[in-house]
């Protein structure tokens, strides 16, 4: 058995995550990142990681895993999901079209929860991503996620993950790191995702105005979204009590159940 390379430091992970989406990651660095927590090997999927093991996370480990689509899970992937990760419930945050085109796999002992989004299919306005590093576009896009998925949540999973991390008491820098780690976790599917983004945005190529900003993950864009979240909802807790309708007492229970004790 080949010994995996040593894990990358938090700063090295962050630096790697800033690689332009149109450029491949160095294979040695990618292997070093994906071979260690928070990343998890789940055959047939990608970008799977334990939110409780993100550096700086205050969320309990082995409680919430985030991942790309599970539609392509292999038999081994199904076994890992159920027996090694101990997953019992999968929350599918995909749109109607995505859910219909690639149904969730059936895994014995694992329940799938999927709820129709509150509005129509998500759209992309590439012009909103042209200025700066695309901050306006990310604020618009992610606030749209919060509105569309009040009934249910690369974008929907990221917002839901940040919500869980923040409610557990994770500091802003660690939440930002989890957001950025998706640049590394999606590398195995990078070319397919770029092609999907080109079709969805109508961009003529990767150098079309705004396209790289839309595809690249930047802390400045995430912070712009968080500013919008504060303005519109009063922050994550305001979103939970206001938009989602939980009481203050229920919020306290949620936070206590999410937070690790150490």
Image (cartoon, grey):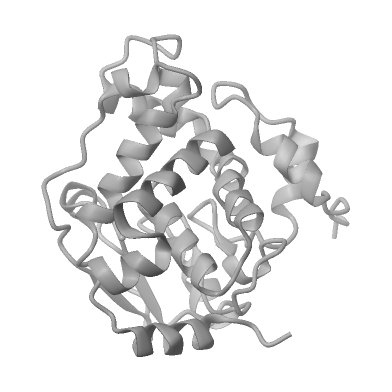
How many callouts does the rendering have? Answer: 0
Asked whether residue 218 appears in the rendered view, the answer is no
Q: Residue at x 44, y 86 (%)?
A: 252
Which residue occupies the foreground of this view, 157 or 30?
157
Looking at the picture, does residue 241 appear above or below residue 125? below
Question: In the drawing, does residue 142 fall left or right of residue 162?
Answer: left
Q: Residue at x 30, y 18 (%)?
A: 127
Q: Quadrant of residue 55?
A: bottom right
Q: Give the x, y percent position of residue 147.
A: 22, 54
Q: Residue at x 40, y 53 (%)?
A: 230
Q: Quadrant of residue 242?
A: bottom left
Looking at the picture, does residue 241 appear above or below residue 11? below
Asked whether residue 112 appears in the rendered view, the answer is yes
Q: Quadrant of residue 51?
A: bottom right
Q: Give the x, y percent position of residue 69.
A: 39, 54
Q: Give the x, y percent position of residue 20.
A: 60, 24
Q: Residue at x 74, y 36 (%)?
A: 15
Question: In the drawing, does residue 72 fall left or right of residue 217?
Answer: left
Looking at the picture, does residue 204 appear above or below residue 80? above
Which residue occupies the foreground of this view, 168 or 18?
168
Question: In the drawing, does residue 238 fall left or right of residue 161?
Answer: left
């Amino acid at each position: 058995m080949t010994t995996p390379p040593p894990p990358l430091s938090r700063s090295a992970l962050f630096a790697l995550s800033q690689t332009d989406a149109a450029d491949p990651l160095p294979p040695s660095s990618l292997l070093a990142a994906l071979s260690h927590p928070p990343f998890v090997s789940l055959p047939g999927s990608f970008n799977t990681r334990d939110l409780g093991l993100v550096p700086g996370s205050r969320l309990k480990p082995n409680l919430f895993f985030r991942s790309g689509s599970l539609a392509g899970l292999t038999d081994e992937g199904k076994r890992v999901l159920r027996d090694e990760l101990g997953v019992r419930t999968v929350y599918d945050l995909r749109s109607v079209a995505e859910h219909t085109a690639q149904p969730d796999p059936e895994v014995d002992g694992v329940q799938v929860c999927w709820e129709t989004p509150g509005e129509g299919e998500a759209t992309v306005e590439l012009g909103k991503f042209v200025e700066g590093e695309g901050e306006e576009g990310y604020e618009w896009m992610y606030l749209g996620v919060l509105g569309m998925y009040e009934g249910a949540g690369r974008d929907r999973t990221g917002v839901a993950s940040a919500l869980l991390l923040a409610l557990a008491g994770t500091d802003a820098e660690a939440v930002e790191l989890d957001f950025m780690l998706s640049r590394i976790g999606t590398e195995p599917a990078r070319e397919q995702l770029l092609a999907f983004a080109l079709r969805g945005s109508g961009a003529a190529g990767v150098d079309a105005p705004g396209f790289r900003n839309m595809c690249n993950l930047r802390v400045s864009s995430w912070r712009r979204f968080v500013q919008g979240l504060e303005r519109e909802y009063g922050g994550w807790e305001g979103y939970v009590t206001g938009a989602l309708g939980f009481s203050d007492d229920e919020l306290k229970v949620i936070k206590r159940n999410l937070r690790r004790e150490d």
